[in-house]
Image: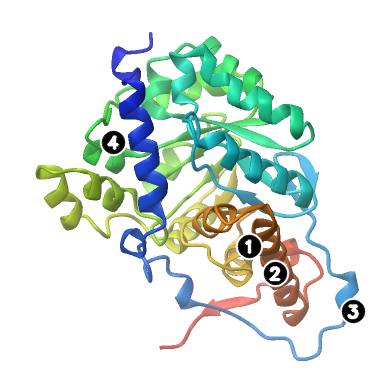
Amino acid sequence: MASTMDHEPNVQFEGRKADHIRLSLSDKNQAVGESGLEQIQLIHEALPDLDFKDIRLDARVLGRNLSTPFFISSMTAGHSESQSLNLTLARASEARGWCMGVGSQRKELGDAEAAREWREIRKVVPKAILYGNIGLAQLIRSKTSDIEKLVDSLKASAMFVHLNALQECLQPEGTPNFKGGLKAIERLCKQLSVPVIVKETGCGFSKATLKRLRGTGVKALDVSGLGGTHWGRIEGARAGDERHAAAATLANWGISTVDSVLGAIGIKHDYEVWASGGVRSGLDAAKLLAMGANAIGFAKPILAAALKGEDELLRQMATFEFELKTVLFCTGCKTPAELHSKKVWKWRAK
């Protein structure tokens, strides 16, 4: 069922992935100020009835008790430089108890050797909680047994299905073929051996789409809203035709992270709500947890730190955790769940 469109030449694939890493670090490709997080204020508690040492970051995610609600968002995979980078990310995620979403496993659908990257990484980090990742366009054209092989190669605890309509339209090598996508997601949820997580890639979710995903069997939904890395801008920077002009026109296309989370929390839903998209600190994470998100994803700041080495990455992750603990203490909350139950946020006065 997989299309030949999924099997682009290796040289082209390698160049595209290298472009993505380079361009995702550029400030020009960040939708700064669009996440809505600046509008959220957490309410200070001057007299917390707590000792700082008693603050915990425990979170329950996909039925598991984890030491933190943080996860590393999906970034890159399947090319010559990705194994070293992903090993750094996976080692750090295992060390600090973060879950990690891997980059797209699309290449494995047509190249069995591409799975070697994950087998080698798994030898080093057998206890890391890793989530697989496949694009909707590839899922539609694949058998569930093909996706199960991706789970097996990674020993994945769950599978991300990423939705990237804007990116696929603007990417020169894109596959903007989403017809039958909802049915494909439903099929995967029924047949796959691990939970399915649906995520956007920086453009967020409308309430209408959030409602359509109810009852599909999706276990979690990562809103990945407007406010962080904007893949439309990235693909526009790579394109030299009408796509470049269209990307400029659509440079702020999407639904903000805050609006996406509020939309999900505000409707009856049967999936966990995860939040990413412009999360740049433990304070940003705390705001989204207070609004009702179950888990929080970091991408750009984690990538930037990882490229400087594992020590810098571990330092950055520890900083995010300490920031969240400090916010918990200063709002009188002992755990991330209390941020939501105690209703410690409000709209910032203009």
Amino acid at the residue labelled 3: Asp
Distance between the alpha carbons at the discs numbered 4 and 2: 35 Å
Amino acid at the residue labelled 2: Leu
Of residue 269 and residue 13, the one placed in the foreground of this image is 13
Location of mark 4 (residue): 168
Amino acid at the residue labelled 1: Leu
Across the whole image, how many numbered discs are drawn on residues?
4
Dot 4 surroundings within 10 Å: few (below 14), some, or many (20 or more)?
some
Give the mark toward the camera: 1 or 4. 4
The answer to which of marks 3 and 1 sits earlier in the sequence is 3
The answer to which of marks 3 and 2 sits earlier in the sequence is 3
From the top left corner, tell me how far across and down residue 178 is, in percent.
31, 27
* CB contact under 8 Å: marks 3 and 2: no
The answer to which of marks 1 and 4 sits earlier in the sequence is 4
Label 4 SS: helix
Residue 103 against residue 314 in the figure, above or below: above
Dot 2 surroundings within 10 Å: few (below 14), some, or many (20 or more)?
many
The answer to which of marks 4 and 2 sits earlier in the sequence is 4
Residue at 42% of width from left, 47% of height from top? 21
Location of mark 1 (residue): 289
The answer to which of marks 4 and 3 sits earlier in the sequence is 3
Give the mark toward the camera: 4 or 3. 4
The answer to which of marks 1 and 2 sits earlier in the sequence is 1
* CB contact under 8 Å: marks 1 and 2: yes
Amino acid at the residue labelled 4: Glu
Location of mark 3 (residue): 51
